[in-house]
Image (cartoon, grey):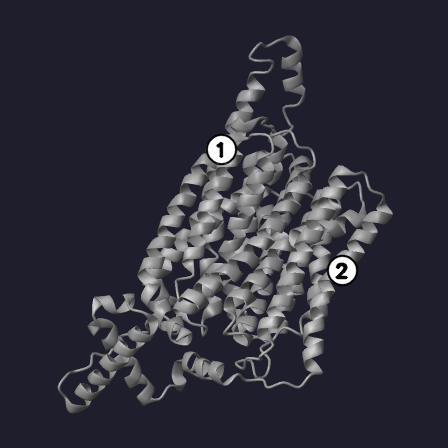
Amino acid sequence: MWIQTCAGIGYLFGSISPVIKISLYYNQKQIARLGVAKDLGDSVGFLAGTLCEILPLWAALLVGAIQNFIGYGWVWLIVTRRTAPLPLWAMCILIFVGTNGETYFNTAALVSCVQNFPKSRGPVVGILKGFAGLGGAILTQIYAVIHSPDHASLIFMIAVAPAMVIIALMFIIRPVGGHRQVRPSDGLSFSFVYSVCLLLASYLMGVMIVEDVVDVSQNVIVIFTAILFVILIIPIVIPIYLSFTQEPRVVPEEEALLSQSGDQGPGRSEHDDGQDIIFSEVEEEKPKGVDLLPALERQKRIAQLQVRLAQAAAEGAVRIKRRRGPRRGEDFTLVQALIKADFWLMFFSLLFGSGSGLTVIDNLGQMSQSLGYENTHVFVSMISIWNFLGRIGGGYFSEIIVRDNAYPRHAAMAIAQVVMAFGHFFFAMGWPGAMYIGTLLVGLGYGAHWAIVPAAASELFGLKNFGALYNFLTIANPAGSLVFSGLIASSIYDREAEKQAQLPHEGHLNLASVLTSFLNMDEPLKCEGTICFFLTSLIMSGLCIVAAVLSMILVYRTKTVYTNLYGRSRT
């Protein structure tokens, strides 16, 4: 959880982009290109996935910390004029390298914890990705303690703080002994962590409101931050308590399920392969109405059909067809997954949904400034908190859908994408308070994506190559940002800014306005009013609806898979 907090530095780009823009005299298109480089660094994790399989996890984490320190440290030196400025393409490389360190933090934490808690993937992924989403708000509060009038010091903190945390904790992150065993206390432990997460989010929200409304002293800010650290440390009570208590480590029913779902890969016997072949024949031969029957009756019918097929195969009456490649729920390689329609439905649904949310996160500073808000840090912190709650809630509610109803997890994602569509609509309208409501809805919906997608990918395509599969899916994030932010949002913003610059005072040119425009021609153009992001927000709202449709198609296609995966445990 603490390491995942450091994986949220990319969400602070909305806070550091204004100072980069002013210091280096960039326009909005150039800032958008830096944002795309940041998103690429945050999402292109093939190297991280490969190194996490080759190196010990602590070594991969160390590589990520070094990348983060070098990338953002060099950006800080340039912004503060301590070293010579670099061309835009070189700045993009630095931002890419710095943010790419996050992929090592993400991969190491997710892969080890999904292996350690295979029967609680939704809660685990939701909590871990939640802390990555909340990292922006936590680091912003720590930055408030520094109280430096130099806004570039936030870049320095982004370079140094994650490296310190990773080096301190990197030997803890690993698959532990007995990782396939289930403790009876797991449910209570996750409930406690959820409670701490909600307390943390509520506390940060309250602190931000107080700091925004009241002019608090520096001593009060220090006290607020000290309490924040106490809340972050509280979850360590669980492993300490469980280390000193004796309890049965395996629940027999769960262990049976784990053996059935976990014995995958090269270790299977020929008998297991035969059972798989019989199972695939059952899928083809069972009547269409079987899946609509109650769970007990459905299992009974399928078992009878499987026995008949096995007897017929043994007598030579039927010839069992051997399937090529794994089926849903087994271990896929990345190449095998890439030829599956389910994988690409998941990818494009993520691209339209999370890509539009990331566009808001990257442009939040300019969006709030265009509507007349001066303190852009408030909205950056707020969307981090809603992002956090979306990830926690997405993991929790998708787990209810899966465990209690044996229904595809992507149903929760479709709901999240509809919520995001409403959020983008509020941004487009620019009504009073629309920034707060839009930030809430987009943050919740965007966060839910990153709790649902990793868990769903591990269920449909297995755990063996989870790191590679997950890192490929995350490419949808920068791909969406490249189109929505790098091409659509920035072009519309700069076009409207140019219109406003050419038509001051409602189109009446005079000597004073001409001289002002001439003297300020090197300053980046600014757009004011709802028109700046009106069309962009409407386009992204429509794309979120398209994403929801794709998610529901995936739900329809995978109903049987989830029934087979979770329907048996419910009976």
Under mark 2, the amino acid is Phe
Q: Which residue is mark 1?
A: 491
- Asked whether residue 73 appears in the rendered view, the answer is no
The label number, if any, that marks residue 229 in the structure image: 2
Q: Is residue 550 above or below residue 403?
A: above
Find residue 181 and report its image quarter: bottom right
Find residue 309 and report its image quarter: bottom left
Q: Is residue 32 above or below residue 3?
A: above
The percent coordinates of residue 35 (x first, y second) are 56, 45
Left or right of residue 249, residue 556 in this image: left
The percent coordinates of residue 179 (x first, y second) are 55, 80
Left or right of residue 294, residue 456 in this image: right
Q: Quadrant of the C terminus?
A: bottom left
Q: Residue furthest left?
A: 317
Q: Secondary structure at mark 2?
A: helix
Label 2: few (<14), some or many (≥20) within 10 Å? few
Q: CA distance from mark 2 to mark 1?
A: 42 Å
The percent coordinates of residue 257 (x first, y second) are 44, 80
Q: Is residue 99 above or below residue 501?
A: below
Under mark 1, the amino acid is Ser
Q: Residue at x 55, y 30 (%)?
A: 430
